[in-house]
Image (cartoon, coloured by chain):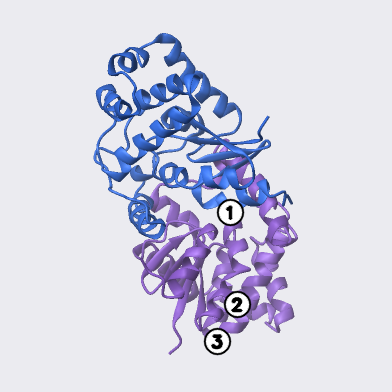
Chain colours: A blue, B purple
Amino acid sequence: MTDTVEFYFDFSSPYGYFASHRIDGLAEKFGREAIWKPVMLGAIMKETGNKPLSYQPVKGEYSRHDWERLGRQMEVPWVMPDPFPIATLAAARAFYWLDDKDRDQARLFAKSAFATYFGEGRDITAAETVADIAEPLYVKRDDLLTAVQDPAIKERLKRETTEAIEKGVFGSPYFIVDGEGFWGSDRLWMVRKWMAGQRW
Amino acid sequence: MTDTVEFYFDFSSPYGYFASHRIDGLAEKFGREAIWKPVMLGAIMKETGNKPLSYQPVKGEYSRHDWERLGRQMEVPWVMPDPFPIATLAAARAFYWLDDKDRDQARLFAKSAFATYFGEGRDITAAETVADIAEPLYVKRDDLLTAVQDPAIKERLKRETTEAIEKGVFGSPYFIVDGEGFWGSDRLWMVRKWMAGQRW
């Protein structure tokens, strides 16, 4: 079995978006697979007493500037979406529904959802929009629209979020390598060292 | 006049402590001088709605683990101090009092204060302790104890903190290079690029 690195994120998390451009390449470099895990950051923040960055005075303004700056630095498309943040239930449910059938397809969908929201600035809250995103991946609209209302899929996302909280996840992105947790896209250097066996 | 990089921190900030081990070397590499600016993070957090990390559930536990891990990784002495966090008024006032007379001496004092609190775990709240820290630098105890009660020095620290808030400082450490702000010890790589002229 391939070793993994767990990648927790919310589709509405800018730093999750930036990390999503790096995590697969980084994992592959060390013969690992990145396991993508969208979670409901709102539920996690309720548990841990955090507030979305953009609701915080000064820090929120800094963050907006930082996201633009990071986009330019990483040469990753960046458009500050409006509305922001959003509830990403539909996208996250669609992800797990696809993931159970085909992990690669789910990952492509996730990248496309991120690109639509943060690369184009298009609101991805609505299930109809999520269906638009999945369609080019040969996912039938009706199947997806039914799936995101399926009680089992709803329950699945809740469970993934609860399990993430139990593992100590409190923000997005959050990475776990062999039980060791790392918070933030700024800590990919440490994730890399950990995967390389440099553990201190 | 030498170009500078402003280094804002609170003596009670672990990430400020870690950054303090890097900022001078980094600045010198680009022919700049790091200008150390202790501020009252408590006052800043009141303004910006933040709470100390260690008071936040889950995130607080992560932080404690992260500080230990960073200490080992950076090979910097680390003892989780108790009490933590503390009010660092006396240390910050002593710093500005020394800084007006001799910038190098003030910086040595700052390093020693950080080392006492985070390297040895000794509480540096009391002015008497701050006097102990300054004594090996040929600073007379009585002079220091008088200075930290001087209304002008008290006012100075308030003004520095207010000015920091006006410049957008909302956490510790925070760096400003030619007007561009960077938050966090994890962003020294970006501070470096900015000083190297790689601005995007």
Left or right of A94 on screen, residue B94: right
Q: Amino acid at mark 3?
A: Lys
Q: Chain of mark 1?
A: A
The residue located at (51%, 61%) in the rendering is B173
Left or right of B53 on screen, residue A98: left
Q: Is residue B36 above or below residue A77?
A: below
Closest to the camera, between mark 3 and mark 1, is 1
The residue located at (58%, 53%) in the rendering is A189
Pointers 2 and 3 in contact (C-beta within 8 Å) = no
User: Which disc, if any, is residue A189?
Assistant: 1
Quarter holding the C terminus of chain B is bottom left
- Dot 3 corresponds to which residue? B101
**Mark 2 and mark 3: Cα distance apart in space:** 12 Å
**Mark 2 and mark 1: Cα distance apart in space:** 29 Å
Residue A122, given in percent of the width and then of the height, sits at 24, 38
**Residue B54 can be seen in this image:** no
Q: Amino acid at mark 1?
A: Trp
Closest to the camera, between mark 2 and mark 3, is 2
